[in-house]
Image: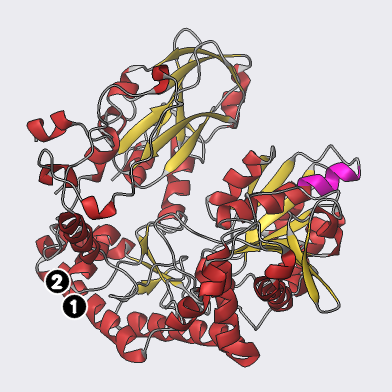
Amino acid sequence: MAEFPDNLHYLDSHEWARVEDDGTVTVGISDHAQESLGDVVFVEMPELNSEVSAKNEAGVVESVKAASDIYAPVSGTVSAVNEQLEEAPEIVNDSPYDDGWFFNITPSNLDEISSLLTASEYQKVCEEEDH
Amino acid sequence: MLIFELSSEGRSATAQFEEAVPVTDIPSAHLRSESPGLPEVSELQVVRHFTNLSKKNFSIDGQFYPLGSCTMKYNPRGAHRAASLPGFLNRHPLAPEQNSQGFLACMYELQEYLKDVTGMQAVSLTPMAGAQGEFAGVAMIRAYHEHRKDTDRTEILIPSAAHGTNPATAVMCGYKVREVGVTRDGDVDIDELKSAVGPQTAGLMMTNPSTCGVFERRIQEIAKVVHDVGGLLYYDGANLNAILGKVKPGDMGFDVLHMNLHKTFATPHGGGGPGSGPVGVGEKLMPFVPTPVVGKDGDDYRWIDQSELPLSIGHLSAFMGNAGILLRAYAYARLLGNQGMHRVGEYATLNANYMAKQLTQAGFRLAYPERRATHEFIVTLADEARDLGVTAMDFAKRLLDYGFHAPTTYFPLLVPECLLIEPTETETREEIDGFVEAMVEILNEARETPDLLKQAPHTMPVKRLDDVKAARDLDLTYSPEFLDNN
């Protein structure tokens, strides 16, 4: 059964967002997403220091089954990318919420985070999809 | 085995050598200094090598091939024979019109048949494959808006059940893609569509019947919503087989479409080609069709080029599409005749619904049980995956052991653990029953000996491939070191 940590915010397109102590936002894909995708074989990241806008494509994740866009949960500047994933995309499967993070955003408006789903709301989205 | 492994120094197939042509005028800087490293083998070795490889393939000539969305129907030998007549085979594409009247007459008539069967006003045969047909279709939508100086239209709407090629096409033509959701019973979410359209809408691309294997019931309402904001409707002909001769996309309100002749008109599905993706257009887009098209003056047939169609989006290939494929499609249409064409959709749909019913009675779950299937339908194995730990892929691989090509797996993405099954109209009831029996056997195995599925296939020349390793460590180039290391 997939995990849905309570301290994260979610998009219905299966990204999670975590507000760090320094006010930046870390982004990854959910446990449910990595389970449905299966073995991740390729990850494409946004460029460091590039601008991303909320609910727009910022990257790509590819498994043997499918390729999906990664949407930015909030607008801002990309302040870090997880370069490890380029060499070892399987980390996304092994540790979707920790080592498997995708990128980090310095948000231009952190209020946008309030429009995201809570863990329980997102869990409901996933259950409906699986039905 | 690679043919390189058969290589023996100095061995060659002299029967294939032409008289050597003396090469004198190539600058020495451009001449290679080493031989190209080709395998050195006898002619018989080459023949055996490739014949044996071909025998390892599944193909429509050997096996039932219910690959959903691909319409793997029988390619009649008569069409092949007609297209292989020496007059067609030896015609040079630059031959004068007066020496090509037979060929041009066939192409003109094919244009007319395709117009008739789709309800369109004009057809261009020139796109070389479905993807190019799609590109041509959306390029015409773009040309239409631009010609009207209506340049603020930046978006193409695409239902989430669409083929992956649709968003790719829209992006290639410079549009942004906006996705429109699908309701639980497989129709486009019309409320979402209404809120998505606006002055930025260039058009909507859709497949009907959709990839969910159901006919979009509110297509006329959808057409009105899109037309009311000035957008155009694009019909992806991927699933035309289901409605061939029964419903015309032109009557549903579509402005432009492409057809996959290698699906609906029974021309061979090659390994990536040669395909054929003619486009048909309604009145608004007639000035923009890709050239050349074939015209008729009195009893004479002739090419119509950009001199007469100045707004055309232009040429898409050196000449006009894949001539041999177009001839096969023409022969197929003639073999069927008007009445036969009507039976294509009927029997494709009958076979799919019969098979869906048989599988349901045997305990399989349909993704859209309340809907009538079109030419294809979706079985979801989500229950089996949860309860028995066997996946749609395990079923697909095990089917190979039973002598059936696997259906399409994990597509559409909307449905978890799915098989998209398309029997086509050319299969007998016995063949369909045989497939259903195999599915039932495999379901029993899944309950009793699930490892049999998880390790499948057992009888094929290659076992289950490690597709994760293949994708992560992609290696497509041969080098002599490869042999030393493997």
* Region of the chain picked out in magenta, as a range: B142-148
B359 versus B121 height, above or below = below
Q: Residue at x 63, y 16 (%)?
A: A109
B329 versus A95 height, above or below = below
Q: On the image, numbered disc 1 is attached to which residue?
A: B441
The C terminus of chain B is located in which quarter? top left
In the rendered image, residue B82, in percent from the top left (x then y), is placed at 51, 79
Q: On the image, numbered disc 2 is attached to which residue?
A: B445
The answer to whether residue B192 is magenta is no
Q: Is disc 2 placed on a helix, strand or loop?
A: helix
Chain of the residue under the numbered disc 2 shown in the image: B
Contact? badges 1 and 2 (CB < 8 Å)? yes
Q: Residue at x 60, y 31 (%)?
A: A56
Q: Is disc 1 placed on a helix, strand or loop?
A: helix
Q: Main secondary structure of the magenta part?
A: helix
In the rendered image, residue B419, in percent from the top left (x then y), is placed at 36, 65
Res B214 seen here: no
